[in-house]
Amino acid sequence: MLVEMDEESVLPASMTGNSISKIEDKGQMTQVTEEMIDQLGVYQVDYSFWKIVQKLIYAPFYLPWVLLAAIIYPEKPEYFIYSSFISMLLDPLFLYIPLINEETKCLMLDKKVMIAALILRVVTDLRYVVKIISKIKKWWPEMSKKIGITSNVLAILPVPQVVVLVFIPKMRGSGSLTILRFLNWLIFFQYLQRVYPIYRYCKNLNKEMRDKSSHMRAWIPSLVNLLIYLLASYVLGTFWYYFSIQREIDCWEYACQREVGCEFSIHCSVNTFRNVTLLHTSCPINPPDPKMFDFGIFLYALQSGMQESTNLPQKVLLCFSWGLRNLSSFASNLNTSNYGWETLFVVAISISGLIFFIYFLGHVQTFMQVAGKSEKSRQKLKILGPKVESMLLEYGFPADAKVLKDSINYVVEQKHSEEPDLVLESMFSVFSFKHKVADPSLQRELNTIRITLFLEKLKKLDLLLGLHKYETVLKEICKHLDPVIYPKGSYIVREKEPVDMMFFITQGIALSCTTDHSIPTRRLEKGDCYGEELLSWATTASTSFSDLPNSLHTVKAHKTVELFALQAADLQRVFSQPSIHSSRFT
């Protein structure tokens, strides 16, 4: 829709915030890493369903490259977040290291899992180490920001390594069990510290989905939230396995207290008196005897025999299914014993399940709202599609000009999310925004439209012939061209007034005249340029606005005129760059 204005006013699109936004990437990955990360899809989330399925299938082959990217470039949050997902899957492996030998009633360590867990933990912790170093270098002058460093240091403390590999094998006496319960809390809280970046990522993702200006497919956050739910089930199942081993050790300690001369020691390598018959009698598992010792929710884990098994995939799958079932049912099917810590664990599962339920219920409501808006948006965009093609023809481009058409469609889609009643009539309606354009992708597409429209026209200007080999300079000039609408009868330029802009007419007719009646009136229409003398001013050694050339003509809109204007200040800024200023102009 064309905007009406009085005689002396104009409506430049530059006032809406379409200024150049240059984003420099300070570091580039190696070619192999970049290709792998790109194939995994770390940068973009706007995929079709089948592309997402395909990427999930091939994801395990690219996981090492994600970790490598997070280590090399810790300042890039997208790498760190995706590697955090991987880390959350690997960290619980430490809790699968303990095994129980039911024949001799002692504890062993699964050496294969231990070696794998240690190596993988070192690899995932390298992300934090590099991040800490980079933050120290960045924040050294202002150490008031050391909180960020402290949180990263806490995340890499070897808490599970010490608890599982050092403390548990050397446990002696009931006092050790009390200390172990405290250490369990340390493991849990460190896990929360390491999962916190994922929480922030999901929070931002959901906020982005609710944002009307977002072009993300509505089901993408739903998929990520589902992965978080499955991850929580996996972690709960892992702690269930870990606590079941500790519960059996509790039974051993309880039985040993009633036996004279029984020295409480749990590791199989320690040669102490161990009355196996007493332990079998006092800690019956299959069949159980709650009167002797009530294992509560851990009985099923002990009866399954997985504490003896070294089949890690089987154990992980069993524990994951237990966690998923009980998180989904809010732990309503769990019957606890009178053991306090077990009751707290069940309460934590119930509260977690309830929080997830409320969270997902709200998210489903948001998803339905966004999906409804998306459907209306798609219907509206189908109507606007033919208008885009006709507009390309009006501006002298074929209807199948792919690059220009794709850029316009992208911008129109963004504008429609802001303005549901968008009317597409000209390029001015494409470039006009109510708010400043802050989205780099949107700004990039707007610049692509400018370059496609005017690059060839700039190459034809006599004063820019010497810059043909500097096409990047011409493209930079194009990025500063902003659309302006002048209604019929308004003055664009007045005679003897400074020429503060150069412009290309894209729609409408203007008349150029002078007080010297011997000079005929000139007709300016689509494709014509005015104000080329501003180029001579911009290319001089020292440019001052007091030296702006005066117009020799008055330019008046004969009909409503749409033009793209290049302001003198923007042109001066482009040509003031050393690499451009030293170029030879003819």
Image (cartoon, rainbow, N blue to C red):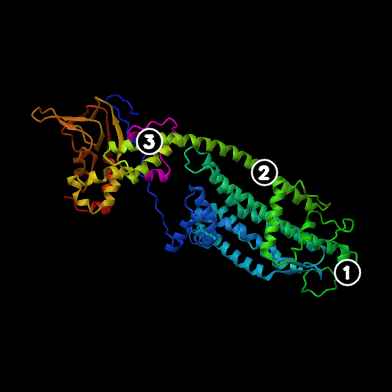
Of circles 3 and 1, the one toward us is 1
Task: From the image, tell me which residue sits under label 3.
Answer: 16
Residue of label 2: 355
Q: Position of residue 149 (x, y in %)?
A: 56, 56
Q: CA distance from mark 2 to mark 1?
A: 45 Å
Q: Observer-nearest residue: 327 or 558?
A: 327
Q: Nearer the viewer, mark 2 or mark 1?
A: 1
Q: Is residue 99 magenta?
A: no
- Indicate left or right for 287 with 366 as reference: right
**Where residue 412 sits: x, y (%)?**
40, 38
User: Distance between the Cα atoms at labels 2 and 3?
Assistant: 42 Å
* Amino acid type for the residue under numbered disc 3: Thr
Q: Residue furthest left?
A: 518
Q: Earlier in the sequence, mark 2 or mark 3?
A: 3
The residue labelled by disc 1 is 277
Residue 491, picture quadrant = top left
> Element at badge 2?
helix
Amino acid carrying mark 2 in the image: Ile
Camera sees residue 186: no
Earlier in the chain: of badge 2 and badge 1, it is: 1
Viewer-proximal residue, 506 or 374? 374
- Under circle 3, the secondary element is helix
Give yes or no for residue 435 being in the magenta stretch: yes
